[in-house]
Image (cartoon, grey):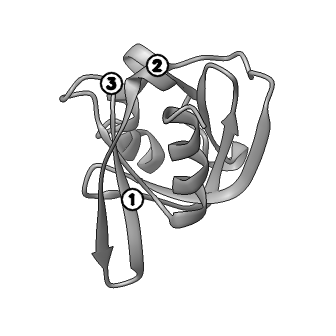
Amino acid sequence: MILKVISSFGWSKLAKRYSTFTRPEGASHHWQSMSLGRFLNYSRCITFRISENGLYVEVFPLLSLGHPPLYFPWSHIRFRKEAVGLFGKNYLYDLGTPRGGRMAVQEKMHRVILREIQGD
C-alpha cells in the first residue's frame, strides 16, 4: 500500500508515457540511486540500462509494486544543472517535456548519461 501511494507522486506520472516491459540490450548499472522531483528518493535500488536509443530505469523487483520499468529516448532527456547538497553533488535532468519530470543522479551515472545524450 505504501509503495503504491509513493509511486503515485512521480513514478506513475512518468509511467503514463514512458512505461515499458521490454528490456533493451545494453550495459546495466545495478544498485544505483536516483531522485524524482524533490521528495522521492530511491537509494541503491535502481538499475539503469544504457541502450543505443535510450535509458531504461527499473526498481529492484522486491520494491517494484507500482513502479513499472521506464524507458526514456535520449531525445527526451536533458541535463539541467549540477546541485550540491548535504550528501555531495547531484546532477539534475529534465525528463520529457518541461512538465515531464526531474531526475537527479549521482556522478557515476551522470557521466554515463551525459556521454550518451551528447553523442560521444
* Marks 1 and 3, the one that precedes in the sequence: 1
Residue type marked 1:
Tyr
| SS at circle 2 | helix
**Residue 101, x across and y down, in percent:** 29, 36
Q: In which quarter of the image is residue 85?
A: bottom left
* Marks 3 and 2, the one that precedes in the sequence: 2
Q: In which quarter of the image is the N terminus?
A: top left
Residue type marked 3:
Gly
Q: Quadrant of the C terminus?
A: top right
Q: How far apart are marks 3 and 2 (CA)?
A: 9 Å
**Residue 3, x across and y down, in percent:** 47, 46
Q: Residue at x 70, y 27 (%)?
A: 51
Query: Can you see residue 66?
Result: no
Q: Mark 3 points at which residue?
A: 96
**Residue 6, x across and y down, in percent:** 37, 47
Q: How far apart are marks 1 and 3 (CA)?
A: 16 Å
